[in-house]
Amino acid sequence: MKTSYLFIIFICIPATLRTNDNLPNCKDALRDCLRTEVVWTRCYEDRIAICIPMTRMAIPNFYRWSVNSSNQAEESTNSGHRVHIPAHALQRSKRNDSISTDYVQITMAVLNSSLFKTERGTCVFWKDSENKNGEGDWSSEGCITTLIHGEFVCSCNHLSFFAVLVNSNLSVDPVNAANLGYISYIGSSFSVVFTTVTLVMYTCLRKGHSEQSISIHVQLTGALLFLHLSYLLSEWWVWHEADGAEGHVCLAFGLILHWALLSTFTWLAIEGFHLYMLLVRVFNIYVRKYLLKLSLVGWGIPTATVMACRFSGVYGIHSFYMTGANNGSSTDICWISSATDSPGVVVSYITVSGYLGLVFLFNTAILSVVVVKLWGQRGKGRMWKDWATVLGLSCVLGVPWGLAFCTYGPLSLPGLYLFSIFNCFQGVFLFLWFLALSRKGRPEHSSVKDSSSQKMMETNFN
């Protein structure tokens, strides 16, 4: 796992800086301190205050500006951090300096957390050890942590190396985190292979006009193929590009992954709606251009949603934070951005969690109706023979996606394993279900030859 917490440094100094050829280059300050100094934090703090940006291009994660000490200072970073320094703090920074002007120069940098030792979640600053051995630790002295609308606000009475150490809701140790990663990669890879085989099989073996139910299954399979393939490509891109993953390519992968996920949810809902039409409504009900209308809904709603989200600028790097006993780490993916200045949190809750919740409730209700009807047809004594049908329909209706709501609380770790196994291998389960449908749909197994709806009923429950 790549550690990717970002930490902010604020240093206020008088704006009357000396110009000297011997002053360090801001671009090389961190590198030089890490190489030559034992207590690199003190070295970096000294150098970053007097360094000269000897380049025409902007230095990544480095900011410097002047502000009147009578005014407050505010600045935002590309990584989503926001800084606010009150006027009285700026005035104190120039106290006891008789030659200083009314302006104060502020230098701010963002550092990767791999340079520090991380332990717990709160607003802290880096405090060097007194024995000057290069070690240190995080301290919350003089800092107050406030959580406002999902964002951490740090109020501190001093300036130094600052950070927000986040305790995620998912507490996963490195071993389990690695296991979950392997399950995701292997399961998605298998799903890509089996969904591709499923699509090829139905394309090659299809004779004449396909049944409506089969056509819906095929389009759900296509959505799953896009989902698992875009997930693997997104993970690969972040891993391949490392810290340079942000950009138009990652934005495109995030958009495609979001679109594929919404398409999968929509086609799962359409599966439930079609089953409702078969079982609850009249069997011979006729809807003009039924499949065309379903296709417009299945692919149109996700497309319109991601286009609206694209103009909102919500796509980019998303960090999933996981904490162990003595370390903090995260894994990144091209998805809905987790930056604090992005509306991604709201978009994720509405289009992913909220949408999934509605689809899950609807399809679970449909599955319950199916079980009740089977119970009435077979009787309690023979109900156990239909377990395969119920499990198959559960997969087709996406009921295992509901395990996402079990990944919080005391059962979060088992919930994560079950969610990863069932949903990453969903393409494989769907392929097995399609094989069962193909076998049961042969002429020797079918006694009703009128409408496609009636044949599908017999295929499902014989």
Image (cartoon, grey):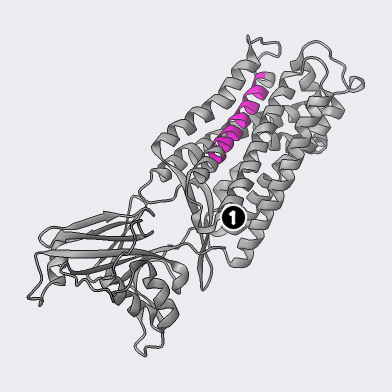
> Where does the image place residue 406, in percent across and percent down from the top left?
57, 50
Q: Quadrant of residue 296?
A: top right
The image shows residue 174, relative to residue 267, as above or below, that is below
Residue under label 1, please give it.
240
Residue at far bottom of view: 131
> What residue sits 64% from the left and 28% below the top?
272
Q: Report the predominant secondary structure element of the magenta stretch.
A: helix
Q: Quadrant of residue 402?
A: top right
> What residue sits 74% from the left and 24% below the top?
214
Whether residue 361 can be seen here: no
SS at circle 1 = helix
Q: Is residue 183 left or right of residue 89?
A: right
Q: Is residue 321 left or right of residue 42?
A: right
The quarter of the image holding the N terminus is: bottom right
> Where does the image place residue 279, in percent across and percent down from the top left?
69, 21
> Where does the image place residue 339, in percent across and percent down from the top left?
40, 51
> What residue sits 67% from the left and 28% below the top?
219
Which of these two is toward me, 301 or 274? 301
Instruction: Identify which amino acid the numbered label 1 is placed on.
Output: His
Q: Quadrant of residue 2?
A: bottom right
The image shows residue 329, relative to residue 247, as above or below, that is below
Which of these two is toward me, 69 or 419? 69
Residue at far front of view: 21
- In this picture, which residue range is highlighted in magenta? 257-277
The quarter of the image holding the C terminus is: top right
> Where does the image place residue 248, in percent across and percent down from the top left?
48, 43
Instruction: State yes or no: residue 154 in magenta.
Output: no
> What residue sits 47% from the left and 31% below the top?
307
Disc 1 crowd, CA 10 A, few/some/many (<14, 14-19, 20+): few
Which of these two is toward me, 172 or 165? 165
Q: Is residue 53 left or right of residue 1?
A: left
Residue at far left of view: 98
